[in-house]
């Protein structure tokens, strides 16, 4: 399908793209967008061949959607500044606008800006495939064995399931795989504890127990 057909209000409809991506086996879809580029001369030279030094600023946006449920995993804006040089031959007049259209300068600063988003993308991917365990249940509080360091945020909704069962091939006894456990309900994170633990409250369901499997909803 033509990617242009997914454009809505000037940007890609990642939720719609995610539905198709999920069917293709993709875990997530990432969209990058250049929001603004500014340039300013910080040095000049004279002569027929001139090497102009400039400061260039780029602001970019990166978004990532989970193809499993269409939820937005990441929506970050980053700004990068660099100083670089460009060469001009035989031009009598030269403005900052010319610098903003210089392919060499644009490529350098945009690359730097998007490079700054890589840790966030990596964190989003790890969070998407993350799973943890219920460490303790006390009253209406559910204590989990993962928290801030694992990429979880206060307000996240997690689903809680029983441990799945291994299924074996009756013909040769080999392990086929593990079937998903029964969904018990969902938990909303409200705070952290310890080095990397989190506290949740019951969002829906009941019967949560220690060692129940927990993953992003």
Image (tube, rainbow, N blue to C red):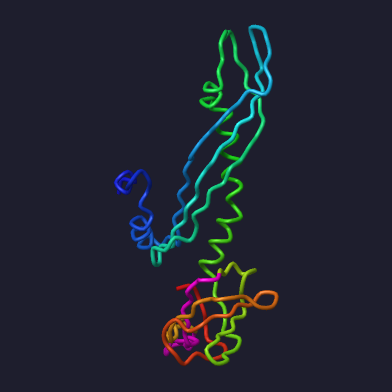
In the rendered image, the vertical position of residue 28 relative to residue 177, given as above or below = above
The residue lying at 45 percent from left, 62 percent from top is 27
Which part of the image, by quadrant, shows the C terminus? Answer: bottom left
Figure check: 24 above or below 47: below
Tag count in the figure?
Answer: 0
Where does residue 178 sit, x and y in percent of width and height? 47, 82
Expressed as whole percent of the image width and height from the top left, the position of residue 67 reads 40, 62
Image quadrant assignment for residue 153: bottom right
Report the front residue among 188 and 105. Answer: 188
Give the residues drawn in magenta, as a range: 154-174
| Picture layout, residue 50 above or below residue 7 | above
Reply yes or no: does residue 165 show up in magenta.
Answer: yes
Residue positioned 53% across, 33% down in the render: 37
Q: Position of residue 163 (x, y in %)?
A: 50, 87
Residue found 52% across the figure and 79% down from its top:
214
Along the horizontal axis of the image, is 166 left or right of 89?
A: left
Question: Is residue 163 inside the magenta stretch?
Answer: yes
Q: Quadrant of residue 21?
A: bottom left
Vertical arrangement, residue 168 with respect to residue 88, above or below: below
Image coordinates of residue 50 in percent, x first then y, are: 65, 13
* Residue 136 shown left or right of residue 26 in the figure: right
């Amino acid at each position: 399908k033509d990617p242009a057909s997914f454009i809505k209000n000037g940007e890609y409809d990642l939720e719609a793209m995610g539905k198709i991506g999920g069917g293709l086996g993709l875990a997530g879809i990432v969209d990058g967008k250049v929001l603004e580029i500014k340039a300013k001369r910080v040095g000049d030279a004279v002569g027929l061949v001139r090497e102009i030094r400039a400061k260039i600023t780029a602001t970019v946006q990166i978004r990532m959607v989970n193809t499993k449920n269409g939820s937005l995993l990441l929506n970050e804006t980053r700004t990068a500044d660099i100083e670089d040089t460009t060469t001009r031959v035989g031009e009598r007049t030269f403005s900052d606008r010319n610098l903003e259209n210089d392919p060499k300068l644009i490529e350098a600063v945009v690359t730097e800006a998007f490079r700054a988003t890589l840790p966030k993308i990596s964190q989003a991917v790890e969070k998407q495939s993350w799973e943890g365990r219920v460490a303790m249940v006390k009253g209406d509080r559910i204590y989990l064995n993962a928290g801030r360091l694992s990429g979880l945020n206060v307000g996240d909704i997690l689903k809680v399931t029983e441990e799945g069962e291994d299924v074996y091939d009756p013909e040769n006894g080999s392990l086929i795989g593990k079937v998903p456990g029964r969904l018990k309900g969902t938990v909303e994170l409200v705070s952290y504890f310890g080095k990397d633990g989190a506290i949740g409250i019951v969002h829906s369901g009941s019967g949560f127990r220690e060692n129940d499997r927990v993953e992003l909803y």
